[in-house]
Amino acid sequence: MIKKENLRNKKSLIKNKDFLFSIICIIGIIILLLIPTGFEKQLYINSQGVKAEVISVDNSNVYQVGLVKQGEQRCKIKILNGKLKNKEIEGVNLLSGKLEEDKIFKEGDKAFVLIEQSKEGEILFANMIDHYRIDSEIFLIGLFVVSLLIFSGITGIRTIISFAFTLACILKLFIPMLLKGYQPILLALFIGGIISIITLILVAGFTKKAYCAIISSILTSLLTCILAIVFGKMFNIHGSVMQWSESLLYAGYQNVNLTLIYQAGIYLSCSGAILDLAIDISAAIEELVDKKPDISKKEILLSGITIGKSIVGSQTTTLLLAYMGSFIAVMMVYMAQGTPLLSILNTKFISSEILHTFVGCIGLVIVSPLTSIICSYIYTKSKAINLKTIE
């Protein structure tokens, strides 16, 4: 009876800790969102972005050249929000001849429009920036949140907190600090470590399985960063291979080291999969120890490695498929042109993706035995401490 009562009190204490930690994380998210990044500047003076409905279109100045369209599309639009709500004006959609950037509006479409005004408030120009997608984005995020709450309950709430905290750290800390010239690798390790700790405690609570996963994921992160730096130099990949990175230099940020940012991004992009695998293995080992309290350190280690084998196989494939999506179009272009496979594999873009993928996969392979080793030590040590306490 006393043992059951102690166990009940212990579970209650853990629940209280988890609840308090969740509240602290929510407060942390709010603080992060309120902290200015230092880059809150108005790009266009006397202008405002609004949602508008396309009432009619005029395509008389649009002409087709091959597969692309050029010229300008004029649209009569009705503003749906802001100080100019319900006002009907003419908007201009400039076409540059690039399919990836251009858009064509039709009657009934919702558009995001940048309206430029004079100091007196007179409308000078209305630029049709793009189709309005904010409502759809909010709906999709809402669907994600509702799905989590329905199928995961309390754990779903913690997952949402973890998701929001990660997003806030990236947008309010990592990116602004990179722009300010902080060392990318150290910054990625620091912020990635914080995200790993917060996420694992939110998901697994203040438990041994969380601590084991935290230690193994942080150690694996260090190894992954080292691999990214070493193989980045071996592959001779410059950070300008990242999309839009060259524009950053022309925008006045010549002080940023694009190559180190690229290498830091390799670690960050696979850190989620690493902590996921770490908690999977440590949770399985904890269940094993609960069912067989007299299990030895060697048995825990071997069981953890066995569990990790099947999980690593599926996780590395998942990582490969996730990265493949970013360069399918490039591969199709090369294949359509009849480019030899060796030439394709040797191109800078494909080589960078190979580096990205396989450094991440090596990280996943490393985290499996590392988590098993840490679990075998922590669980047997805590078991020995408990036995001494009972004696």
Image (cartoon, grey):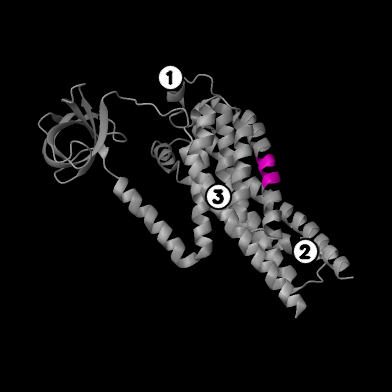
Which badge, 2 or 3, comes first in the chain's sequence?
3
Category of crowding for the residue at label 3, using alpha-carbon neighbours closer than 10 angstroms: few (below 14), some (14–19), many (at least 20): some
Marks 2 and 3, Cα distance to the nearest angstrom? 33 Å
Q: Disc 1 designates what residue?
A: 250
**Badge 2 amino acid:** Ile
**Badge 1 amino acid:** Tyr
Which badge, 1 or 3, comes first in the chain's sequence?
3
Secondary structure of residue under mark 3: helix
Marks 1 and 2, Cα distance to the nearest angstrom? 55 Å
Task: Kindly indicate whether the residue at mark 3 contacts the one at mark 2 (C-beta within 8 angstroms).
Answer: no
**Badge 3 amino acid:** Cys
Give the percent coordinates (x, y) of residue 380.
81, 62
Range shown magenta: 218-224
Q: How many numbered badges does the structure rendering display?
A: 3
Instruction: Between residue 370 and residue 360, name the one nearer to us.
Output: 370
Give the percent coordinates (x, y) of residue 245.
46, 28
Q: Disc 2 designates what residue?
A: 300
Secondary structure of residue under mark 1: helix
Q: Disc 3 designates what residue?
A: 25
Quick check: 326 left or right of 102? Answer: right
Quadrant assignment for the C terminus: bottom right
Quick check: 334 left or right of 7? Answer: left
Q: Please indicate, yes or no, whether residue 238 appears anywhere in the rendered image.
A: no
Secondary structure of residue under mark 2: helix
Marks 1 and 3, Cα distance to the nearest angstrom? 38 Å
Which badge, 1 or 2, comes first in the chain's sequence?
1
Instruction: Between residue 12 and residue 251, name the one nearer to us.
Output: 12
Which of the 4 image quadrants contains residue 119?
A: top left
